[in-house]
Amino acid sequence: MIVKVNALDHIVINVADVARSVEWYRMVLGMEVRVFDPGHGKPVRTSLMFGQQKINVRPRGADKVEWFTADHEMPGSDDLCFLTSSTPEQVVTHLKACGIAIEEGPVTKQGARGALRSVYCRDPDGSLIEISSYENAVA
């Protein structure tokens, strides 16, 4: 095969309120908030940085010409799994301290590299957020 992807660079999530969402991801998941200019006269954008990845945060109703995106964008429709080196018990303690309801977990799930221990919650738009660590490896 000529083309074979080997990593994920960034994803785009659609949200109802950019400020509310980026504050949640900063506070709950420790992501760094960055504002950047995409160029070509387009409005500034907000991203969340973590590890070597980023999430671009697209506001509901953004013009599809200015922000080329999926055909059916909808806040709250994402299902994202993030890796952490924290234990599931530490994740539970942190989420409770932040006032975040736990949807499920800790539970064992299957990740890309094997068994994960996962805790589930929801972001401000209702997207399902899985915070996981590999059982036999550091994330």
Image (cartoon, helix red, strand yellow):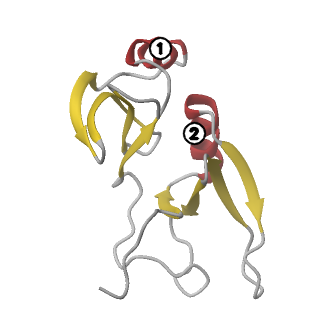
Horizontally, is 9 left or right of 79 in the view? right
Q: Which of marks 2 and 1 is in front?
A: 1
Position of residue 55 measured from the top left corner of the image (x, y, whole percent): 56, 56
Position of residue 128 measured from the top left corner of the image (x, y, whole percent): 34, 42
Quadrant position of the N terminus in the picture: bottom left
Q: What amino acid is labelled 2 in the image?
A: Tyr
- The 10 Å Cα crowd at callout 1, few under 14, some 14 to 19, many 20 or more, is few
Q: What amino acid is labelled 1 in the image?
A: Gln
Residue at screen point 40% across, 72% down: 5
Horizontally, is 72 left or right of 51 in the view? left
- The 10 Å Cα crowd at callout 2, few under 14, some 14 to 19, many 20 or more, is some
Q: How many labels does the image show?
A: 2
Depth check: give the residue in front, 22 or 115.
Answer: 115
Q: Which quarter of the figure has residue 4?
A: bottom left
Q: Which of marks 2 and 1 is nearer the N terminus?
A: 2
Tell me if residue 12 comes above or below residue 82 in the rendering. Answer: below
Residue at screen point 38% across, 51% down: 76
Measured in 3D between alpha carbons, the distance from the residue under mark 2 to the one under mark 1, in whole angstroms, is: 17 Å
Q: What residue is shown with label 2?
A: 25
Q: Which quarter of the figure has residue 129?
A: top left
Tell me if residue 13 comes above or below residue 50 in the rendering. Answer: below
Tell me if residue 119 comes above or below residue 12 in the rendering. Answer: above
Q: What residue is shown with label 1?
A: 90
Horizontally, is 73 left or right of 25 in the view? left
Depth check: give the residue in front, 66 or 85.
Answer: 85
Tell me if residue 82 comes above or below residue 46 in the rendering. Answer: above
